[in-house]
Image: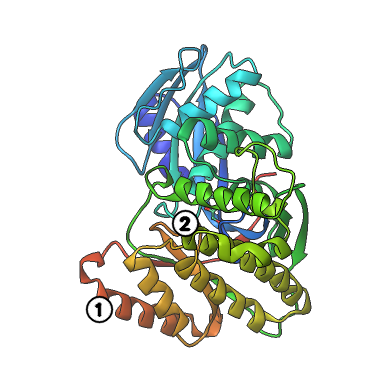
């Protein structure tokens, strides 16, 4: 269906047929929020919704890009790109070409039509669009990237072009995940396991509850929170008499929990809260992985709710709408666990739920949410998803 739509827009816009297709799934992160930029341990699932691209190689290095979700045809020459953003939806694509060009000869651009299945915010559509476009550009230029390189380069686009100081959670999920397996990744050494869906005795569905507010991390407090975590780490290293390096290279993962426990009261309250989120989330991820392996969905879900609570109280992300959504989900029967799906600055909540109760959950959450935010009728949406393979 989507392919036909892409084909037909491609034909209308470019007067010929597109020759190739690629795409990338979105991701959800049930546990391990906001700790990847501190080199923590995270979990994630790729889902069966994502970005699709229909494209054809150009003779020179020109790109002509259309999105079914955003307005305007965006055109650029890869050679002429600078680090300067233009402030529109194609920045992620310019950034991808710019980062790739530093390492590889890109003799060909692409004409492309792309589309995303879901509204952006919380499902890492930015990493998905970067990875899908990177894949298309590489195929058009005969370049083969390892999975590791895909993850590293896609993160670099965010860090050095888009300006978001994110870690590797999103890119890793979207590249490495496998259907019906939970990615359990140590972002410090990039070692990972794919934990098979447990024999839980109960099946579960993955629910995306979209608040109706789309977001851009570049305009959120994301980078400020990263700096607060680093500041907490730097101060703890100094209080604890540890050897430390540059501020830039500092992260909470380098600070043992004992040092945090000993000196936490010396920290400004706000940094202490960020650190409290980090250490408690690290603990939840590890307990969550154990519960998952044992098929204990109840514990896994409870840890998700606790993670959501810590994101609200200690990490202080979320907005009134998303926080209300979390509270509604926490009080809806049939939901095992829920939290903000990604960064939590707008976007959506993810929930693991009992599929036999899907209809009543969908109805109750919608009613309660729209009662509180009637203006978001039409923008709020619920999607039931399944896990899927990453692009790797
Ligand atoms: C965004 C970032 C990720 C990660 C999450 C929060 O999705 O891109 O690197 O920090 O937020 O867990």
Foreground residue among 314 and 305 = 314
Foreground residue among 58 and 241 = 241
Which secondary structure, mark 2? loop
| Residue 20: percent from left, percent from top | 56, 32
Quadrant the C terminus occupies? top right
Specify whether tag 2 is near ligand 1 (CB below 8 Å).
yes
Relative to 110, residue 296 above or below: below
Specify whether tag 1 is near ligand 1 (CB below 8 Å).
no
Q: Residue at x 37, y 83 (%)?
A: 364
| Residue 121: percent from left, percent from top | 42, 54
Give the image quarter of residue 64.
top left
Foreground residue among 288 and 348 = 288
Foreground residue among 333 and 40 = 40
The mark nearer the N terminus, 1 or 2, is 2
Give the image quarter of residue 192.
bottom right
How many marks the image carries: the answer is 2
Q: What residue is pinned by disc 1?
A: 371
């Amino acid at each position: 269906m989507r392919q036909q739509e892409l084909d037909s827009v491609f034909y209308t816009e470019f007067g010929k047929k597109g020759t190739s297709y690629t795409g990338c799934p979105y991701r959800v992160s049930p546990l391990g929020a906001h700790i990847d930029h501190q080199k923590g341990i995270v979990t994630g699932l790729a889902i069966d919704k994502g970005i699709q691209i229909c494209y054809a190689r150009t003779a020179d290095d020109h790109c002509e890009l259309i999105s079914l979700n955003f307005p305007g045809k965006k055109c650029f020459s890869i050679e002429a790109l600078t680090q300067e953003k233009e402030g529109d939806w194609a920045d992620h694509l310019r950034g991808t070409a710019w980062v790739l060009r530093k390492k590889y000869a890109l003799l060909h651009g692409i004409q492309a039509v792309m589309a995303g299945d879901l509204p952006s915010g919380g499902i890492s559509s930015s990493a998905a669009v970067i990875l899908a476009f990177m894949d298309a550009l590489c195929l058009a230029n005969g370049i083969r990237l390892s999975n590791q390189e895909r993850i590293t380069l896609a993160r670099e686009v965010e860090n050095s072009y888009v300006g978001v100081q994110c870690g590797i959670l999103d890119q890793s999920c979207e590249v490495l995940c496998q259907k019906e397996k939970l990615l359990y990744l140590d972002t410090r050494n990039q070692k990972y396991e794919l934990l098979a869906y447990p024999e839980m005795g109960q099946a579960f569905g993955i629910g995306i509850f979209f608040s109706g507010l789309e977001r851009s991390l570049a305009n959120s407090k994301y980078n400020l929170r990263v700096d607060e975590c680093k500041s907490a780490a730097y101060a703890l290293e100094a209080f604890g008499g540890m050897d430390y390096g540059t501020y830039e290279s500092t992260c909470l993962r380098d600070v043992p929990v004992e040092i945090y426990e000993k000196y936490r009261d010396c920290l400004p309250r706000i940094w202490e809260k960020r650190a409290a989120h980090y250490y408690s989330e690290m603990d939840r991820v590890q307990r969550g992985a154990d519960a998952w392996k044992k098929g204990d969905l109840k514990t896994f879900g409870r840890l998700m709710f606790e993670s959501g609570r810590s994101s609200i109280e200690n990490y202080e992300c979320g907005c009134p709408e998303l926080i209300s959504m979390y509270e509604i989900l926490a009080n809806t029967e049939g939901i095992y666990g829920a939290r903000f799906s990604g960064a939590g600055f707008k976007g959506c909540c993810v929930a693991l739920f009992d599929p036999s109760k899907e209809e009543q959950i969908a109805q109750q959450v919608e009613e309660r949410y729209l009662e509180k935010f009637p203006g978001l009728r039409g923008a709020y949406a619920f999607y039931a998803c399944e896990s899927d393979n990453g692009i790797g």
